[in-house]
Amino acid sequence: MVPLDTIRELFVYNYWARDRQFEACATLSNDEFLRSLGNSFPSLRDTLAHLLGAEWIWLERWQGRSPEGLPAADYPTLAALQEAWRPVEQGVRDYLDGLTEEAFCGRLSFRNAKGERWTYPVWRSLLHVANHQTYHRGQVTMFLRQLGVSPPALDVTAADRAGVLDPAGGEKYFRKEA
């Protein structure tokens, strides 16, 4: 099992990496942001909207609800997508801040959009979301390159060098030795 503090840190990293990609996306025209380039999700906007939707549905599940699907959402601009993401991010941060070790080690049961019942360890569902976001950020990086934008470095080591990661134990991970 992954420790709760590590999961919390993964989400700190997740939002840092997402925000760096937002900064890169902000250099694009809205037409470029919406342009269909072909992939799992056709455009940058569609890929980012998928990330937002996935985070929202898992937050709903962690809060004891089983939504029947994603909410209808059309984000005509990067700013609209960012605005829609704020309360979801805050909800995830609040959930993680209030999560006890006992609940973290517990089970999460929900019904998916097909009505099927699923049960996972809470910790694994959180790890899944962090991993899912990382996977699709790779696609965002590819889109940025296709559109002529140099994508930001998003490695965990880049986050550490930027001072983003500071575990509760005090020592930073991946410190360059003097």
Image: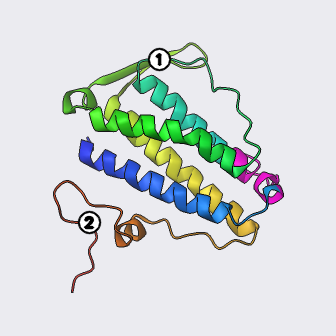
Magenta span of residues: 31-47
Locate residue 138, reporting x and y percent.
58, 58
The quadrant holding residue 91 is top left
Please, what is the three-letter code of the amino acid marked with disc 1? Arg
Residue bearing the label numbered 2: 173
Mark 1 is surrounded, within 10 Å at the Cα level, by few (under 14), some (14 to 19) or many (20 or more) other residues, namely some
Q: Is residue 177 above or below residue 5?
A: below
Q: Is residue 67 above or below residue 22?
A: above
Can you tell which mark lies on residue 48?
none
- The quarter of the image holding the C terminus is bottom left
**Which secondary structure, mark 2?**
loop
| Residue at left offset 17%, top offset 61% | 170
Please, what is the three-letter code of the amino acid marked with disc 2? Tyr
Q: Is residue 66 above or below residue 73?
A: above
- Verify whether residue 25 appears in magenta: no
- Verify whether residue 42 appears in magenta: yes
Can you tell which mark lies on residue 65?
1
In the picture, measured across the screen, residue 79 lies left or right of residue 99, that is right
| Residue at left offset 39%, top offset 42% | 127
- The quarter of the image holding the N terminus is top left
